Image (spheres, rainbow, N blue to C red):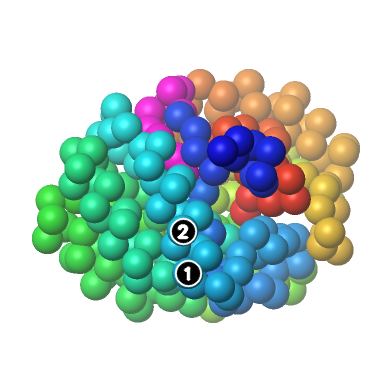
Amino acid sequence: MDKKASGPVRYSVITQKNSREIVMLRGSGCAWRRCRFCDYHLDSSKDIAANFRLNKQVLEDVTGQFHRLEVINSGSFTDLDEQTVRAVEETCRQKQITQIHFECHWMHRNVTAGFRRRFLDQGILVKLKTGVETFDPLFRECYLDKGIDTDSAEEIARYFDEVCLLQGLAGQTKESMDRDIQTGLAFFERVCVNIMNENSRPVRPDPRVIQIFETELYPKYREHPRVDILLHNTDFGVGGDGCYAK
C-alpha cells in the first residue's frame, strides 16, 4: 500500500540533533481545540477501531535504530486509544526503544506522572513536550487562546521536559522571540521553534517577522544542540496533505 498516496506521511527518521524515529499517529483529536493558530486537530477521527488499524500499520515501520522514538498526534497522548498505547508499548519492547517522546496539552498535566510511570515500569523513559508558543502570557492567552493558566515557566517545567514555541507572528520582535527561546533553554531540556505556516485558522504568519527570525535568530540557533527549528511544518518528515503541526 502506498502510504503517501493515501494521506499524510506518518513515519520518518530524524538524523540531525537528538536522532530518533518519529511517527504521526491519529487519535480522537485535541480536547482543547480553541487555539486560534492551529488546525492540527483536523487529523483525527472518532472511529477508534479505524485509528488503531492505521496506527498499528504506522508503528510497523519503526526499526528501533536509535532506541528513541517520538510519537506525535493531533493533540495529546491522552487522545490516543488504549489499544494504540499498548501497541506503542509493544513496539518499544520489540525494537528495544528505551526513550520515547510524547506531546501533551497543559490541561492534561495531572495525568502525566502516571503515564510516565506506566512506561518506566517497562524500562522506557518518557519525555513530554508541550506547546507553550510564547512565555508572554498576555500574547499567549488573549491572542492565541492557548489555555495555559500559569505565567510561570518553572511551573510548566514541573510537568514537561520539552517545549514548543510558535514564531513568525505579527507583534513579535527579534527581542521577544529571542527571549522566549532563552527562557525555554533555561527551564526545559529541549526547545522546538515552529515558524507559523498558513492554515485555515485566523492567525496568519507575518512575512516581516519571519524574515527577522531567518536573518537574526536562525543563524544563532541553527546548530544549537538543544534547539530544533521547523521553518516548515513538515521539516521533521511527517505531515502534509492538510495536516498542520503545532
Image quadrant in which the N terminus is located: top right
Q: Residue at x 13, y 51 (%)?
A: 123
Q: Which residue is mark 2?
A: 53
**Residue 22 in magenta?**
yes
- Residue bounds of the magenta highlight: 14-23
Please state which of residues 242 and 180 is positioned toward the viewer in this rendering: 242
**Residue 112 as seen in the image, left or right of residue 73:** left
**Residue 121 as seen in the image, left or right of residue 223:** left
Q: Amino acid at mark 2?
A: Arg
Please state which of residues 238 and 143 is positioned toward the viewer in this rendering: 238
**Residue 194 as seen in the image, left or right of residue 27:** right
Asked whether residue 16 appears in the rendered view, the answer is: yes
| Above or below: residue 91 compared with residue 48 | above
| Above or below: residue 134 compared with residue 110 | above
Within 10 angstroms of label 2, few (less than 14), some, or many (20 or more) residues? few
Residue 135 spot, x, y in % from top left: 58, 59
Q: Amino acid at mark 1?
A: Ala
| Above or below: residue 231 compared with residue 30 | above
Cβ atoms at labels 1 and 2 below 8 Å apart? yes
Q: Which residue is mark 1?
A: 49
